[in-house]
Image (cartoon, rainbow, N blue to C red):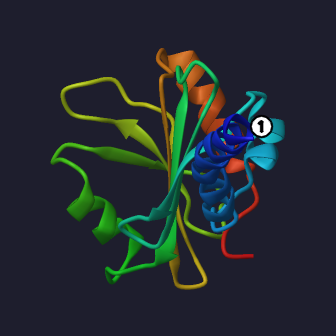
Amino acid sequence: MQRLLLINLLCLACSAPQMALAAEAQDCPFTADYLSQRLDKKLKVVTAGKGLLGKACEYADDKRSVKIAVDAGPNPAPSGEMWRKMSNPPGTKWESVPNDADKAVTLAAYPNGEPYPALSYERKGWLVTINVMGVSGKAAVGQWNAKLVHLKRLPE
């Protein structure tokens, strides 16, 4: 009887953090399933909470070789361009996405390193930033940026 009680308590203790993460994942800007389908990579939520802008979540594959950070919330700066200047090192360059209604930009140059897939845009008073880590090479970065541009826009 005591052994059974101990096993049940151990199972409950191990599952509590998973249940908490599941509850937090509901607050993420995107579901892991949605991103997995759109980005052709099986992803799961690894952290969820408050970011610099608002709702923030980090997604990763099982090996954690690719990480995607999404931060979305009311723009604290007069414009998205000013926020990007304040929140990135000097010398960071962004490239406009042609004909984009939300003034989306992708990362073109990053000081002291290669650019990585990144998308930033303004929509309905919100600023959204999506950064992908673990992807390198100009061709791969371009492919990922193309996928990021076609994600549904926040807020809906």
- Outermost residue, front side: 1
Residue 116 location, quadrant: top left
- The amino acid at mark 1 is Ser
- In this view, 102 is above or below 32: below
Residue 26 location, quadrant: bottom right
Residue 3 visible to the viewer: yes
Q: Which residue is mark 1?
A: 36
Secondary structure beneath dot 1 equals helix
Residue 99 visible to the viewer: no
Q: Position of residue 97 (x, y in %)?
A: 58, 51
Residue at (75%, 41%) from the top-left corner?
1
The residue nearer to you, when weighing 31 against 141, is 31
- In this view, 11 is above or below 143: below
Q: Position of residue 131 (x, y in %)?
A: 48, 43
- Crowding near pointer 1: few (<14 within 10 Å), some, many (20+)? some
Q: How many marks?
A: 1
- Outermost residue, left side: 90
The quarter of the image holding the C terminus is bottom right
In this rendering, would 47 be left or right of 108? right
The residue nearer to you, when weighing 146 against 56, is 56
- In this view, 144 is above or below 68: above
- In this view, 79 is above or below 60: below
Residue at (58%, 28%) from the top-left corner?
142
In this rendering, would 7 be left or right of 66? right
In this rendering, would 131 be left or right of 154? left
Q: Position of residue 52 (x, y in %)?
A: 35, 67
In this rendering, would 112 be left or right of 148? left
Residue at (38%, 30%) from the top-left corner?
115
